Amino acid sequence: MSTLNVPPIPPSPRDDAIQLYSAFKGFGCDTSIVINILAHRDATQRAYIQQEYRTMYSGDLLKRLSSELSGKLETAVLLWMHDPAGRDAIILKQSLTVAKNLETATEVICSRTPSQLQYLRQIYHSKFGTYLEHDIERNTSGDHKKILLAYVSTPRHEGPEVNREMAQKDANVLYKAGEKKLGTDEKTFVQIFSERSAAHLAAINYFYRDIYGHSLKKAVKKETSGNFAHALLTMVQCAENPAKYFAKVLHKAMKGLGTDDTKLIRVIVTRTEIDLHNIKAEYLKKYKKTLNDAVHSETSGNYRAFLLSLLGPNQ
């Protein structure tokens, strides 16, 4: 469930464009106007505002925002301005080919649904003129490369239906391919994790725990390592409870000395219109503190105001 709070009768995109233009005029930018408008418009409305701005002022709103804002606020607002698939494409291009941050690329790919991935691949190609698979091929290696390529290109069922008999069989097959033998048959893990639906993977986890006394997640941690393990763990955790998975990612971003603002921005911005409400509930349940309070204590100024606007009421 989304946390985005859009006015019941939002102003027209034209009015929003005029307001934004006036916020940019003069010395300095009236950042509160920018936040009050953009943090309360959905992806479609944000696209219309950009169109209107271009029509009225012959300028690119994203470029103007980039010149008017700075630091972490600029990063967060610019990422927010894209639609979900376009945003994921930008994050993946950056993490695969520029920053070489394979943890980020793995999280984005392995937490998305098959239909989201299918659309993302189309947008990626139209935006960058190269296939997502080619960039994965060029910038990853080993079993990690195999699982990512299989996961983005294999069609999977998205419904809740599960063949329990097959799920139990898969649990046995994974046990034999991992914990039961010396060494690990990674090929079997790649095949099952990339071909089974999220509901089916969650059922495998249930049977694995039931039969062998501990979770599939624990087995994956024991049998695999590095980015390959991260991919499998992301898949199994998102199959069971994506909100709980992202609550953990957010907590990790804010834990200890300093804050991983890139991660904090990425998760809040990408999940606001999907399931941030559920993530907030999972965060409170696990860490006995609201996500809003955690973000408030780790951020400041207009950057804090923007993230808290996306997070919605403190509950």
Image (cartoon, helix red, strand yellow):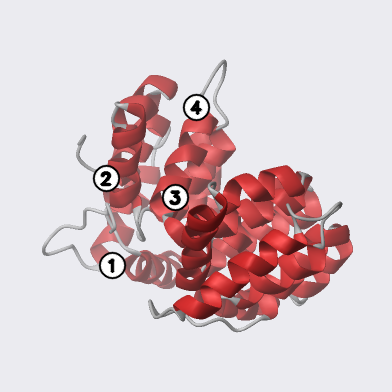
Q: Position of residue 159 (x, y in %)?
A: 40, 80
Circle 2 packing at 10 Å, graded few (<14), some (14-19), many (20+), is few
Above or below residue 273? Residue 280 is above
Residue 241 appears left or right of 60: left
Q: Earlier in the sequence, mark 2 or mark 1?
A: 1
Residue 36 has which mark? 2
The residue identified by callout 4 is 254
Quadrant the C terminus occupies: top left
Q: Earlier in the sequence, mark 3 or mark 2?
A: 2
Q: Can you see residue 33?
A: no
Q: CA distance from mark 3 to mark 2?
A: 16 Å
CA–CA distance between discs 2 and 4? 25 Å
N-term mark: 3 or 1: 1
> As shown in the figure, which amino acid type bears the numbered disc 2?
Asn
From where the camera sits, is residue 5 visible? Answer: yes
Front label number (2 vs 4): 4
- Element assignment for label 2: helix
Q: CA distance from mark 4 to mark 3?
A: 16 Å
Packing grade of label 3 (10 A; few <14, some 14-19, many >=20) is many
2 vs 1, front mark: 2
Q: Which residue is mark 3?
A: 269
> Gap between marks 2 and 1, in whole Å?
14 Å
Is 162 left or right of 8, judged from the image as shown? Answer: right
Answer few, some or many: residues within 10 Å of disc 4's Cα (few below 14, many 20 plus, some between 14 and 19).
Answer: some
Q: CA distance from mark 4 to mark 1?
A: 35 Å
Q: Amino acid at mark 1?
A: Pro
Query: For the point 38% across and 30% down, which residue is it?
Result: 304
Going from N to C along the chain, the mark reached first, 2 or 4, is 2
Residue indicated by mark 1: 13
Q: Measured along the vertical axis of the image, is residue 279 above or below residue 58?
A: above
Categorize mark 1 by other alpha carbons within 10 Å: few (<14), some (14-19), many (20+).
Answer: some
